[in-house]
Each structure stands twice: as structure tokens, then as C-alpha cells.
Image (spheres, grey):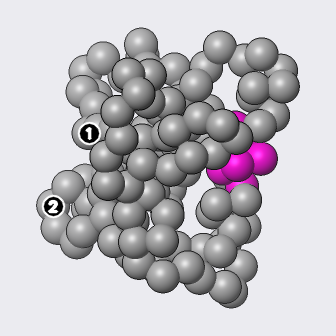
Amino acid sequence: MIVPVLDGTTQTGDEEIHGKTWRVTGPHDLANIENLKFKCVSYVWGLGTEDKGSFFNCQRKISDQTRPALSAVIKAASLAHDKIEAFWIDAICIPQLEGKEREKTLERYDIL
């Protein structure tokens, strides 16, 4: 999940979006997933990409549409005074490195 940083600290990979600092968190306990409130961001990837590490220190190339899509959703939620301030966007929230955790997440993602 991508959540606002509330304690004022910053870490490598944090991003400033619309005046708030945001951070990728997880993995989250799937046994308590019903209590996890978030907005899922869907967008068209398109042909352009951003370099590894350019957004939330993502270690895979991501679509050049990822940043504007997430930014638009965060802005819309703040304008609507939406109390949900956690976001899921696949390019960032699916585990970044190849391996079992990524495979497990992708398997669950297809089922949802």
C-alpha cells in the first residue's frame, strides 16, 4: 500500500505528492485484509516507461502513466475529503523483485 507519512520522517523511496509525503508499506497480513481500507488505482500503462528507481524507488521499469494516475487519485480523494488515505497501484505495490513473494501476489491479484 501507499500511505501518507504521518511522523515527519523520510526514507529512501518516499515521494512528495500534493504537499504530503507518501511511502510504500507492506507486505500486509492477508488474514486481516478485510480491515485494510484503500483505493485501488487503475490506469492504462501505455508505451512509455520511467527508469528503475524513479518513483518510490521502484526496482522495475514502470509506466510513465503511473505517477500521474496516482497523483490524480490522491488529489481527488483529498478534494472529496475522503478519509481513506491508502492506495494500491500495481506497478508499485506488487513486490518488485522476481521470486516467490511476487509470484504469490500476482496469483492472488488474478483471482481478485
Q: Secondary structure at mark 1?
A: loop
Give the image location of residue 73, x and y in percent.
73, 41
Most prominent secondary structure in the magenta stretch?
A: helix
Q: Nearer the viewer, mark 1 or mark 2?
A: 1
**Most distant residue in the left direction:** 100
The quadrant of the picture occupied by the N terminus is top left
Q: Is residue 51 above or below residue 23?
A: below
Q: Quadrant of residue 35?
A: top left
Magenta segment: does it hold 71? yes
Q: Is residue 98 left or right of residue 51?
A: left
Identify the disc placed on residue 27: 1
Check disc 2 and report its element: helix, strand or loop: helix
Judge the density around disc 2: few (<14), some (14-19), many (≥20) Cα neighbours within 10 Å: few
* Residue at 41% across, 27% down: 8
Q: Is residue 68 magenta?
A: no
**Among numbered discs 1 and 2, the one appearing first in the sequence:** 1
Classify residue 87 as left or right of residue 30.
Answer: right
